[in-house]
Amino acid sequence: MLTARRRPVPTPSSFAGTLALSCALSCPLAGALAGALSFALSFALSFALVGALACDSADAGALDVLVEAEDVIIEGLTPGDGAENIRDGWAVEYERYIVVLGEIELQLSTDRAVAVSAPELFAVDLAAISSAGDSLWQLRSLAEGRYEFFYSVEGASAASRHDSVSAADFEEMRAGDWSYLIDGVLRKDDGVSCPPPDLSDPPVGATPAGTSAAGVPCYANPELRFRVGVHEATHYGPCEIDGAPGVNVTASGGQTAAVTIHGDHVFFNGFPEGAEGGTQRLAQWLADCDLDLDGEVTEAELAAITPSELAELDDRYQLGGSPIIPLTSMWDYVRAQLKTQGHFQGEGECPIDGVEHAH
């Protein structure tokens, strides 16, 4: 669905019409001239508005908006020493990465009164779509020019189900009005969990396999599952890529733009301001949140742990710049990182809820 609108502007034709009526009462010749002026101005104004919206014109521009997943959502993250690797030895695989997004809006940069929107919301499993992305929104009859670009992540209650999402998952998301449903697995052959001692509840008879660098008892835990279902509505924009704002629409041409969701921010060691180059991706903190050592990290466990109670969050982590303040638990930390994952055209940046946050 495409909605085009133009905010109210003064109408010269109404002024000319008033002038024509006034002059007609006092001078027949002047009234005739003013009437002609009224017609001319009305015609010119109508022509200008048609040109601005380019409705039903052969010269109208078109824009297809895709949703695309960062490759780590589809392919996973691997351990290693590279900039894109998990640096503490864990491998990460996403089995589901469902996000509700849409509410695309364009605003003509030279005249923000001209705005075009595609308000549909879709629940899409980014782990199941093509690496080339999927076209979900089509905007037509666009006037030529550069447009600022906005979009949103919202709850599932008002969304439509994409073919990549099962009916059961969609109903669960709708019931909780979730914005995200993420299922993932951490794996490491010699992996351990080192939960905060005052919060941990190891099984009877469990024996520590050693201690962490901070002296916390650690237990063998080579595979852990984690599941996140959360409502975290976020508005993104105006977006830019390489310093260029939004998208440039040309007459008689078709362009594409992509809403890109990243999948590694949960493993960032903080909330970087600037490029991601200096950021480390670490997963041990999540393994340490398995308080009962059953091989699964839950929302309740994350919510029970404050950042200060997690020894793994040492001086490698910088928690300033979080879009959620204060961070009272590791569940808040997850929520905050999810808010930072919205991008544009791959690595393009978008202010989060109106606040600049380059990463």
Image (cartoon, grey):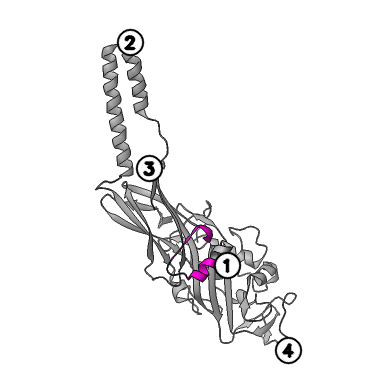
Secondary structure beneath label 1: strand
| Residue type of the residue flagged with mark 4 | Gly
Q: Where does label 3 land, which residue? A: 110
**Quadrant of residue 253 within the rendered picture:** bottom left
Q: CA distance from mark 1 to mark 4?
A: 32 Å
**Quadrant of residue 191 within the rendered picture:** bottom right
Q: Where does label 1 land, which residue? A: 229
Q: CA distance from mark 3 to mark 2?
A: 42 Å
Q: Which mark, by number, is residue 26?
A: 2
Q: CA distance from mark 1 to mark 2?
A: 73 Å
Check whether the beta carbons of the residues at disc 1 and disc 2 lie within 8 A of each other.
Answer: no
The magenta-colored residue range is: 155-172
Q: Earlier in the sequence, mark 4 or mark 3?
A: 3
- Residue 2 x %, y %: 38, 51
Q: Earlier in the sequence, mark 1 or mark 4?
A: 4
Between circles 4 and 2, the one closer to the viewer is: 2
- Residue 329 x %, y %: 66, 65
Secondary structure beneath label 2: helix
Q: Which residue is at the far top?
A: 26
Secondary structure beneath label 4: loop
Whether residue 269 is visible here, answered yes or no, is no
